[in-house]
Amino acid sequence: MPARTALDLTADFAVPALEDLYRDLHRHPELSLREHRTAGRLAGRLRDAGFDTAEGVGGTGVVGLLRNGDGPTVLLRADMDALPVVEETGLPYTSDTAGVMHACGHDLHVTWLTGAAEALAAGRETWRGTLLVVGQPAEETGQGAARMIADGLYERFGRPDVLLGQHAAPGPVGLYPHVPGLIMAASTDVDIVVHGRGGHGSRPEATVDPVVTAAYLVTRLQTVVSREIAAGESAVLTVGRIEAGTRHNIIPAEARVALNLRTRSEEVRQRMLAAIRRIAHGECLAAGCPREPEVSVGNTFPMTVNDAATDAVVAAVHGEVFGPGTVFDPGPAMGSEDFPELALGTIPYAYWFVTTTPAEVWEQAPGETLSEKFSAVPSNHSPHFAPDPATIAPGVRTLVSGALAFLSVA
């Protein structure tokens, strides 16, 4: 019944208008907590569809509320922020903002959410309950969901019974990966400051070179996963940035190293943090640094763990909507999300992926197997990431059918 109703509600909806919205959002990306224009576009469409709409929730967040009789409250969420990436897609609707790009697909997420909200509002005679639509800021920095909660999201608009979210992902168009449990890892940013003693490049003996120490540190950190984490565990340690110095002939007084960790358990996360602190202190001691290093933990994302029963309901309706072979369990990914913050540890949720690689790109990618091609096509955060607009209609249907699976039948 939900699948059939979803197909009926999305049979004649205005796809060209949503494609125009998508191209506009892609052309005008905005960084975290600066999503003013994006929020305005979403809020305007929600108002026109009949939602009670609020802006500025948690900074730049948007909330649309549609009460439609007695029944469950279902929250649909899309993140809105872009990334500090220089676009290299060559698309006719490429970013107009220098150094900023929708390299993670959040423009597509907002488009999907808009279409789903409009379709469900237009077909409200088919369901009963409350629809809570959330345009969330600052997912990329891990701040947005928590900021909306702190700003009284549920006190002001009602606590939902179930949360639903989805994400664009590389892969041939037409697949809808679901995982009934852990689907994404936790993420932790770590910053290290190595303190040396600066001086002239011609007299290294009078200095303590923090660049050399940082280089040893980066190399040594590669052993954390390979030598301190059990083979059966999954973890990633990435050195994303090294900063030091101003001139060729100046030995600087400090060097900065920025790390990102991906873990699937709190135990492994704590073990990695302890190892990083130990290694940083050890390398600085060996180098004779005048001060101990500063090791600080920055942005963190929780693990995304689907409620198995909730995800099973959504996966089943997606299988009915899109047909056999379109829904499968790929196992957990090492990417991260702040979506679980909306659950407050108790609200059940389902989160899934929608594959978006254009057919011609997928076909031309080297490799024979799905995994080989998956590794070859542009992924999220790539300057070449360009989802196929043909996924707009299917992405709307995933949200509509997922919501209808929990809303009461009219």
Image (cartoon, rainbow, N blue to C red):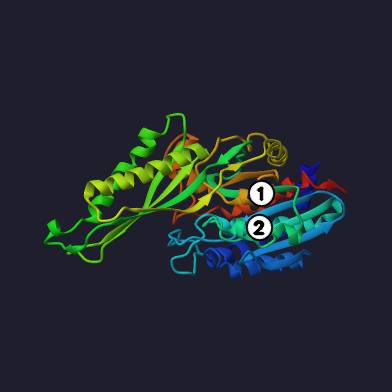
- Quadrant location of residue 228? top left
Q: Residue at x 38, y 41 (%)?
A: 275
Q: Which mark is residue 344?
A: 1
The secondary element bearing badge 2 is classed as helix
Residue 295: horizontal and vertical position, in percent?
Answer: 38, 52
Amino acid at dot 2: Ile
Viewer-nearest residue: 306 or 174:
306
Q: Is residue 15 visible?
A: no
The secondary element bearing badge 1 is classed as loop
403 sits left or right of 257 in the view = right
Q: Residue furthest front?
A: 291
Q: Residue at x 79, y 65 (%)?
A: 50
Count of numbered circles in the view: 2
> Is residue 132 depicted above or below 186 in this figure?
below
Q: Residue at x 71, y 55 (%)?
A: 116
Q: Is residue 43 visible?
A: yes
Determine crowd level at label 1: few under 14, some 14-19, many 20+ residues with C-alpha closer than 10 A.
Answer: few
Residue 129: horizontal and vertical position, in percent?
Answer: 83, 52
Amino acid at dot 1: Leu
Determine crowd level at label 2: few under 14, some 14-19, many 20+ residues with C-alpha closer than 10 A.
Answer: some
14 sits left or right of 137 in the view = right
Q: Earlier in the sequence, mark 1 or mark 2?
A: 2
| Labels 1 and 2 touching (C-beta < 8 A) | yes
328 sits left or right of 357 in the view = right
Question: Which residue matches tag 2?
Answer: 149
80 sits left or right of 204 in the view = right
Residue 229: horizontal and vertical position, in percent?
Answer: 41, 34
